[in-house]
Image (spheres, helix red, strand yellow):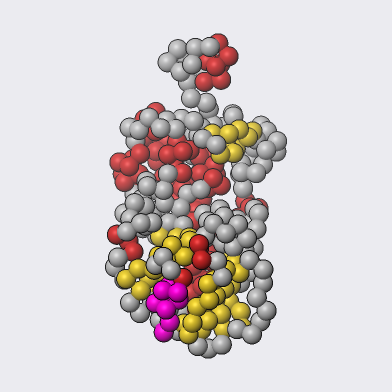
Amino acid sequence: MPELPEVETIRRTLNELVAGKTIKSVTVNLPRIIQKPAEPVEFAAALEGQTISGVERRGKFLRFIMDDLVLVSHLRMEGNYSVYPSDEPIKLHTHVLFHFEDGTDLRYKDVRQFGTMHIFRQGEDLLEKPLNKLGIEPVGNPAFTLAALKKLLSGRKTKMKPLLLNQEYVVGLGNIYVDESLFLAKIHPERTADSLTPAEWKRLYEAIIETLDKAIEAGGSSVYTYVNSQGEMGLFQHQFQVYDRKGEPCVRCGSPIEKFFLAGRGTHICTRCQKKPVQANGTTRKEAAILGTE
């Protein structure tokens, strides 16, 4: 699933490609992509004549800002936007086409068919689902401070990885960038938030910002099928420290990177750099499980 760096890269690309264009008509080939309004015919009619003034982002969602409407789009697993001449043949799995007055199309392609689109009146989209419960933005946001991060998370008994994946606290972080941030901060993903020291919170805060900034600068990560709206691959996968590096040497200490599953998600760590949480009796969770004391 595209995470914040990938969605931000797509947003920037789309701004270059479609800002200022006016929608002449809309074709919906897969009705279930359209979540609001309920009828695809109403969706298409509402967008006719609307001019896209810009594309913004909220977490992993794209926001197409128009004259008096906002189109909220979530790419989910493999959704992708591209611009084509209107007379170019339509590729397989192209589910929604926005036909512009200048003879080009913005086409939404989604092999897995999990993407969603909602239309709202301007000013309403941030107050309703799916955006109204999203947490704080960690990129380009002066409100995202160390104090704000600690206020949101510290004291909770939840393990750090699932906590950071929860979009109601900090938005945009997914499997890749949580693994990378926790490694950079030298924090084991099974540590609970209430166990972190002030120094660890500082390292984590700085690691989240550094990881996301570097990933955005690299155009995101092309691990599976991700490309931006100009068909270009991201390059951050070449900078991975732990993610997708099972068995390879740690860049810090040389120990092999290990992979295990936490909350149903593949998780990559260096067991030497990221110490396991310790039980009250001094044993690690793994030792406690063997001894039958956990």
Q: Residue 161, position in %: x, y?
A: 48, 38
Q: Is residue 31 visible?
A: yes
Q: Nearer the viewer, residue 38 or 268?
A: 38
Q: Residue 128, position in %: x, y?
A: 32, 59
Picture residue at 33% right of the left edge, 77% below the top? 68
Picture residue at 43% right of the left edge, 82% below the top? 48
Q: Height in image: 177 above or below 264?
A: below
Q: Residue 291, position in %: x, y?
A: 55, 11
Count of residue discs: 0
Q: Nearer the viewer, residue 40 or 173?
A: 40
Q: Residue 14, position in %: x, y?
A: 51, 72
Asked whether, in this view, residue 266 is left or right of residue 140, the answer is right
Q: Nearer the viewer, residue 29 or 70?
A: 29
Picture residue at 54% right of the left edge, 34% below the top? 262
Picture residue at 53% right of the left edge, 72% below the top? 28
Q: Is residue 229 visible?
A: no
Magenta: main secondary structure equals: helix
Asked whether, in this view, residue 101 is left or right of residue 69, the answer is right
Quarter location, residue 159: top left
Point out the stretch of residues depicted in magenta.
41-49
Q: Height in image: 4 above or below 62?
A: above
In magenta segment, residue 76: no
Asked whether, in this view, residue 72 is left or right of residue 228, the answer is left
